[in-house]
Image (tube, rainbow, N blue to C red):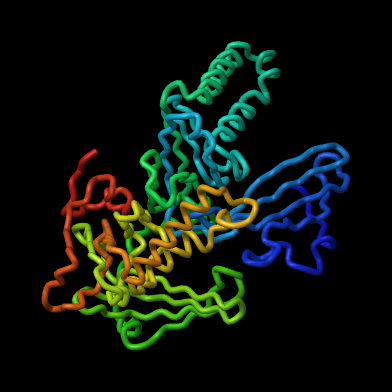
Amino acid sequence: MSGINEDAARGGDVIRDIGTDDDWQPTEIESLCMNCHQNGMTRLLLTRIPFFREIIVSSFSCDHCHWSNTEIQSAGEIQEQGVRYTLKIKTKQDLNREVVKADSATTRIPELDFEIPPYTQKGSLSTIEGLLERAVSGLEQDQPARREADPEVAASIDEFIQKLQKLKDVEEEFTLVIEDPSGNSFVENPMAPQKDEALTLTRFKRTNEQDRRLGLRADDDEGDNENDGEEPAGSDLETMRSEVLVFDTNCPECNRPAKTNMKLVSIPYFKEVIIMATNCDICGHRTNEVKSGGATEKQGTKITLHITDASDMTRDVLKSETCAVLIPELEFELGMGGLGGKFTTIEGLLKDVKDLIVNKNPFVSGDSGVSDKIQKLSEFGAKLEKIMAGEMDAHIILDDSAGNSYLQNVYAPEPDPEMKIEKYTRTFEQNDDLGLNDMKTEGYEQEK
């Protein structure tokens, strides 16, 4: 990456905030070219990937030697869990999907037994086709020297390059897997907000080694994660029940110092949960996050509510970070981890869904908008508004494989005629996502 001239950056923010009138104008900084050591230009743009999060796109170009490079960095923090995207590529159109690949991500194509290890490439914003071309370019780079030193190895690599090139014709279906322990990689779902049958997103618990490589754990720290998610013990638990704990943190929006309040709350007819609320006095950002106060339940829980009246919007909802949200009438599914853990109402949850899918989506307005996508998302937002107003018959489903989500029964302690609660046995894959397959856990099937 090019060296940044501090004088050029002084006098204003290097990155402009999202939401300002000049969102899409990059910041230009005169920078030192690391190829010819003349001055070139670095352009930085803080942008939001739809249905994902903020990233920094940086591009450097030098008019003297014409050297250039482009890379991306996450503008947010390392996520609580890693992500694994598995995409079945069936048509050439799938090659146009946008991909954010962090430098901590591993890329695999199982059919070719091909793998790009983490930290061997800079982060990139590209397409599936762009990833294949980048892999080909990397293999071709040293081929002339290999042909001189070891013709047999060079011939084998030439043969493998042909196989990679052939993938771009998509004559046969193949699989692309992107696994990122930082949780900051992304593969586009062109069918959003509907579910993409070809794309599977799973979240996983990082290993100690992955934490060390991400700088989250000291090199000599061999501690384990056995107590993650468990209740605090003894006096700490009593303190959390009796008072609000306050501790210093950084605002997730502007990264300025802020305060986070934490309280252990008992929900009637359910369990105790930990609610954490962060308020930033500088930028006004407010957020709340919910953590289960107990262990993962032996069975998953699926809660289905038939929304029949606008008064249903006031029902309390506890959505854990392991809970998926579905609205069958809109063919909508928000996977596990979407929106994080929340304690809110039905109306608040639907508003958060609308903000995520429509209001905070930069591709809905401006030159970057695509007319059919704009219309599709606008119609989705209008239907959500009708549901919130009680003008559209709909069902909302909370599917939590950890069993730690809750929806208020307004008829309690009597059964709710509009709400159905189902307990189910988790599959092997669901326990794998929850990090339970290495534990002696009852109530699930060991199936592959």
Q: Nearer the viewer, residue 272 or 339?
A: 339
Q: Residue at x 60, y 70 (%)?
A: 255
- In x, y percent, where is residue 58? 69, 50
- In x, y percent, where is residue 264? 33, 79
Q: How many marks?
A: 0
Side of 345 relative to 161 (left or right): left
Q: Residue at x 38, y 53 (%)?
A: 205
Q: Residue at x 45, y 24 (%)?
A: 112
Looking at this rendering, what residue extends furthest in the left direction? 414
- In x, y percent, where is residue 75? 60, 58
- In x, y percent, where is residue 395? 26, 61
Residue 438 visible: no
Looking at this rendering, what residue extends furthest in the bottom direction? 242
Q: Residue at x 63, y 64 (%)?
A: 18
- The answer to which image quadrant residue 8 occupies is bottom right
- The answer to which image quadrant residue 153 occupies is top right
Side of 61 relative to 226 (left or right): right
